[in-house]
Every structure is written in structure tokens, then in C-alpha cells.
């Protein structure tokens, strides 16, 4: 009998404790209890109100930033949102524009790595030991990977000027782009980060001629040095141009 009373007593204590916890929660008014932590997917340029959020901070403001209780999808990528300083929500920003698959910007990787992972386009006879050329990769007339000592150093993309508007939007979803004036020519330079030190890839976009737009991808770490970046940029751009000439 004593064992039975002891068991009932323990059960009552557990129920009372649960009741006190529930009452205490209601009394405290914990505002983030109603926050849904289901992962979020948004198209670039869209936004979403997070119900129950008083504050939102983001792990990567280049991908997504927040104002009050609203998260804004800015550039393609992944980030984490911290809501009310307590709850974490993962967010994926997805592209609207799909002109071609994002190039393999694994800087320093070897030729075989690119061959094994570049699935889009037709491998071209224009390829050599230090460059891999793929033709008709989505809307890219040509995609070229350039190597130095068997390490990926730069990537060139050639797109028809018929896609100028779409290509501009495609790049703006992936890079922070700004105009750059070099003599009488106007370029657009960009990076996949708000600051170069936070970025992995830098990009230079220019009009090659009436038929083609040309984009040169390179490591952002190279571009952070003005002298080195100028040399790398000129070399990469000249190599892209030499292949474009073969397309005429």
C-alpha cells in the first residue's frame, strides 16, 4: 500500500510540475514560442514576414538581410536566421534566372575535377592541356576553364547579346555588381560577397562586340590585390577573347 501511495504521489508531483511550467510559460509571454523554424526557400528578390519575430539577424547579409520582422532574399545562396535571439531558421535563396549552370568555382582544383563535375554543354575540340572548353552550356555559347600548373585559375563565359537583359539579371542574383570605367571602356565588376575579403569569386563583365558578352570569373583573393588582379584579369580576358575569335 505504501508503495502504491508513493507511486501516486510521484505521479501527482509530475503533473503539478508540468502544470506550473505551463502556467509559468503563459505568464512570461515567451514571444518566440510561435516562431516556425521550418527551413525557408525564397526566390531572389522576394521577402517573407516571420510571424512572431521581434528581431531577426542573419549569418550572411549578402544572401539575405532582415528589416524588423521581414527577411529579404538578395543573392543566391544559403544562410541562417536567428529569430528573437533564440531560434534558428535556415534559408535558401533560389535563382529566378537559369541561363547556364553556375560554373565550378572551386579555385585550385585540377582538370579532372572539372571534367567530372561539369555536366552541361558539349566538350569542345578547342580544349587544350591548360583550358577546357564547353560549347552550348545552356544559354552560354561557350564556357571555358583556364588552368595554371593544373590548378583552376579562371573561368570565361560567353553569352549572346540577345540575352543581355536576362544575363544582367542572372549575374545580379549571384554577384554584387558595380560599374568600372577603364579608359573609354565601361566594365562591370562584381563579387559574391559584400566585401572582397568575404567573397570567394570576383567577376568582370564586358561587351566584347555586337554579338557577344564576356564574363571573366577569378578568385576574389587574387582580385584583392590591384597589381595582381590587373595581371590576372588581362590574362584571363585575353584568353577568353582568343576563343571567342574562333567562334566568329
Image (tube, rainbow, N blue to C red):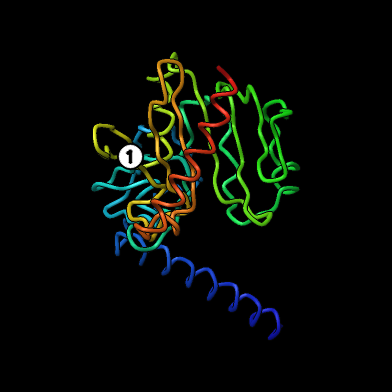
Image coordinates for residue 23, horizontal then vertical, percent: 37, 64
Image coordinates for residue 25, horizontal then vertical, percent: 37, 63
**Is residue 40 at all visible to an observer of this figure?**
no
Residue visible at 36% across and 56% down? 196
State the SS at label 1: strand
> Which part of the image, by quadrant, shows the N terminus?
bottom right
Image coordinates for residue 188, horizontal then vertical, percent: 33, 36
**Is residue 121 at all visible to an observer of this figure?**
yes
Quadrant of the rendered image containing residue 179: top left
Image coordinates for residue 81, horizontal then vertical, percent: 40, 53
| Residue 74 left/right relative to 94 | left
63 or 3, which is in the foreground? 63
| Residue 160 left/right relative to 183 | right
203 or 236, which is in the foreground? 236
Residue visible at 30% across and 42% down? 70
Pointer 1: what residue? 177
Residue visible at 33% across and 39% down? 177
Q: Residues within 10 Å of mark 1 (few under 14, many from 20)?
A: many
Tag count: 1
Residue visible at 36% across and 48% down? 62
Outermost residue toward the bottom? 2
74 or 17, which is in the foreground? 74
Quadrant of the rendered image containing residue 195: bottom left
Above or below, comparing residue 145 to residue 14 in the picture:
above
Above or below, comparing residue 93 to residue 80 in the picture:
above
Quadrant of the rendered image containing residue 3: bottom right
Amino acid at each position: 500500500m505504501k508503495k502504491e501511495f508513493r507511486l501516486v504521489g510521484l505521479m501527482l508531483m509530475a503533473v503539478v510540475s508540468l502544470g506550473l511550467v505551463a502556467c509559468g510559460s503563459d505568464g512570461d509571454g515567451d514571444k518566440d514560442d510561435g516562431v516556425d523554424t521550418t527551413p525557408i526557400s525564397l526566390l531572389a528578390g522576394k521577402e517573407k514576414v516571420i510571424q512572431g519575430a521581434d528581431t531577426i539577424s542573419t549569418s550572411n547579409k549578402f544572401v539575405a538581410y532582415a528589416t524588423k520582422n521581414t527577411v529579404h532574399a538578395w543573392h543566391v545562396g544559403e544562410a541562417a536566421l536567428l529569430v528573437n535571439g533564440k531560434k534558428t531558421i535556415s534559408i535558401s535563396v533560389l535563382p529566378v534566372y537559369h541561363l547556364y549552370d553556375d560554373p565550378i568555382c572551386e579555385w585550385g582544383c585540377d582538370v579532372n575535377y572539372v571534367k567530372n563535375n561539369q555536366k552541361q554543354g558539349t566538350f569542345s575540340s578547342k580544349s587544350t592541356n591548360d583550358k577546357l572548353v564547353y560549347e552550348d552550356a545552356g544559354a552560354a555559347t561557350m564556357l571555358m576553364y583556364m588552368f595554371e600548373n593544373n590548378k583552376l585559375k579562371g573561368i570565361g563565359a560567353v553569352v549572346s547579346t540577345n540575352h543581355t537583359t536576362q544575363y544582367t539579371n542572372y549575374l545580379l542574383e549571384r554577384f554584387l555588381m558595380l560599374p568600372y570605367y577603364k579608359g573609354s571602356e565601361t566594365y562591370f565588376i562584381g563579387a559574391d560577397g559584400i566585401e572582397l575579403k568575404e567573397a570567394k569569386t570576383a567577376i568582370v563583365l564586358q561587351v566584347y562586340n555586337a554579338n557577344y558578352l564576356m564574363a571573366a570569373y577569378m578568385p576574389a583573393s587574387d582580385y584583392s590585390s590591384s597589381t595582381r588582379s590587373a595581371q590576372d584579369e588581362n590574362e584571363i580576358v585575353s584568353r577568353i577573347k582568343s576563343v571567342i575569335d574562333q567562334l566568329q
